[in-house]
Structures are given as structure tokens and as C-alpha cells.
Amino acid sequence: MSLHGVTIGEPGHDLVVTAFDPSFGDVRTGDVEWPLRHGSRPGVDFLEAGTISMTLRSGYGVRTRAEADRVTSGFMRAWRRDLSVAPGVLTPLLVQTGDTARLVYGRAGRISPPVPDSVLMRQGLVEIVCEFRVMDPVVYDVSPTGLTISVVPRSLGGIIAPIVTPVTTTLRSGVEYRMLDVPGDAPAPLTVTFHGPATDPQVKIGGTVVGISGSIAYDEDIVVDGQTRTVQLATGAPAGHRLSRVSRLDQLAAPPGVHEIAFTATDRTGTARVTVEATPAYYHL
């Protein structure tokens, strides 16, 4: 596992995991009792927050009190970094089992450091019990899967008389389609990145539409993130005001399976592009 750059759990590291108990939360229901009859009317179900409880011990290379203090201080410093994280921001905990690596999002919670100046500490034995609060009960792959779609310009067929001045023309592209295969067993959040130059670019993924109102400059990228529900420029500047009225950030996710992606925009240069990425999601590690 890795948190804030501190890796634990493998031979050769200062700390190894001796106990690991993940719990991804109970189901919160909207059930309502039927009046004057048996049972309840089922409502909408949601997953509650969960926890990952861990017991950590020092590795074989830690043999003295000074080394035990160093290991304890290093881990406590990383664990308490979450105290300075802004509200609404989740901390990723990397959990790797064999060849599988997953990200769990939450905050570092309670921790029981070793007893100071104990017999075990003097011998270099560190034992830490801690709990990571899982705020998002779905876990994610480390790397997303995605594709890039280029605009398809329509050819102009000439000018048809009579001509009325002033003459103005627009060139709306055709609709380009691609297929995106989303693995996993939970709905995967999508990230849509619009690359300029383009005017009114729009992507349709299943029944979800995401688009930008107005023009994107040739050196601009606008990133629409379905996991954090944010719209930003590549520089990090907010750009939510540029989202089209038909866009729905709360629906920017795709269930496992193959999905058709449609892209269209107005672009005379034929260089406008969009990148659609899905981060596979799972209900288990």
C-alpha cells in the first residue's frame, strides 16, 4: 500500500502489513413501511462509507530504538497530512495485491502509535494500528482506458445562386463514432477532454450528452471530469461556465460493457479532437 508517497506492506520496507480488514460500507435504503399491510415499499439504495483497518509492524531491518522512532515519525507524518487537505478533496490510497493495483478514496482516520520507550520499541519493534475512512465505497483502476476522436469535416459543395450578401458560412462537422470498451463491475466515471480549435463541440455517450458552448481556441483544452464533477482548463482554471446547458455531470459515467461514442463540432481546420477516458470501477479490491 502507498499513502502520500509512503509505501508499506512489502518485504524490504520499514513497515509490513500483518492484518488487513476492508469494509466498504453497508447499504443505505429508502425503504418505507406499507401502511395497513405487511412489509415495506423498496426505495433507492445507496452504499455507505466504509473503513480499512490495518495493523502494521516494523520490518526486519528495524532493530534499534532510533530506527523505530524514525519509522514511526515517517508514517505518522504521512498519515496526518490529511489534516491539511481541503474540504471535499479525497485522498487516494493505493492498494496492490499481486499484479492488481487499485485506488481507494477517503481520508486517514484514527491511529494508535506504539507505546513510547516500551521494551518492544527499545528492540526496534513498531506496531501501529490505524483505520482509513473509505469515503467512496467504489475502488478504481490506477490507469484509465480511453480513445481520441477527431472531427470529421463535411466537404463544401460549392455556392448555389441566388447569393444574398453579406455571405456567411459555417461548417458543422459530420458525426464521428467510436466504440469504448469499459471493464470492471461498477459504473466507471468518465473524463472528457475537448481539444481546440472548435466551436460548440459535443460528445454523446449512450444517453448522456456533454458539450461546450462557444469556441475553444487552438491552444486550449477543456477537461470535464465525471468523478470530481469539475470543468477546468488544462491549466487548472475553472471553466464550468462554458459547459453547455444539455450537459449532465451527474450522469457522466458508463456501466461495464461496450459503448458508442459520438463526437461533433464546428471546425474549419479539421483538427478538433476529443479524448474520452473511463476509469474502471469495482465493488471489491
Image: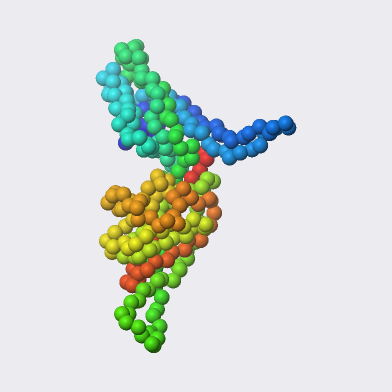
Q: Position of residue 15 (x, y in %)?
A: 36, 27
Q: In the rendered image of this protein, does residue 54 appear above or below residue 184?
A: above
Q: Is residue 45 visible?
A: yes
Residue at x 58%, y 40% (from the top left corner): 44
Q: In the image shown, does 146 or 237 lie closer to the viewer?
A: 237
The foreground one among 51 and 195 is 195
Q: How is the image coloured?
A: rainbow
Quarter containing the N terminus: top left
Q: Nearer the viewer, residue 175 or 170?
A: 170
- Location of residue 178 with respect to 99 vertically, above or below: below
> Which residue occupies the extreme bottom position in the image?
161
Q: Is residue 60 left or right of residue 262?
A: left
Residue appearing at x 35%, y 55% in the figure: 242
Q: Give the vertical position of 23 relative to 225 (above or below).
A: above
Q: How many marks?
A: 0
Relative to 171, is 228 above or below?
above
The quarter holding residue 5 reads: top left
> Which residue is at 36% across, 24% downward?
58
Q: Is residue 278 visible?
A: no
Task: Give x and y (percent) for residue 132.
Answer: 42, 29
Residue sitting at x 46%, y 48%? 250
Q: Quadrant of the rendered structure where residue 265 is?
A: bottom left
Residue 83, percent from left and from top = 32, 29
Front residue of this view, candidates 107 and 284: 107
Residue 193 in percent (x, y) is at 37, 56
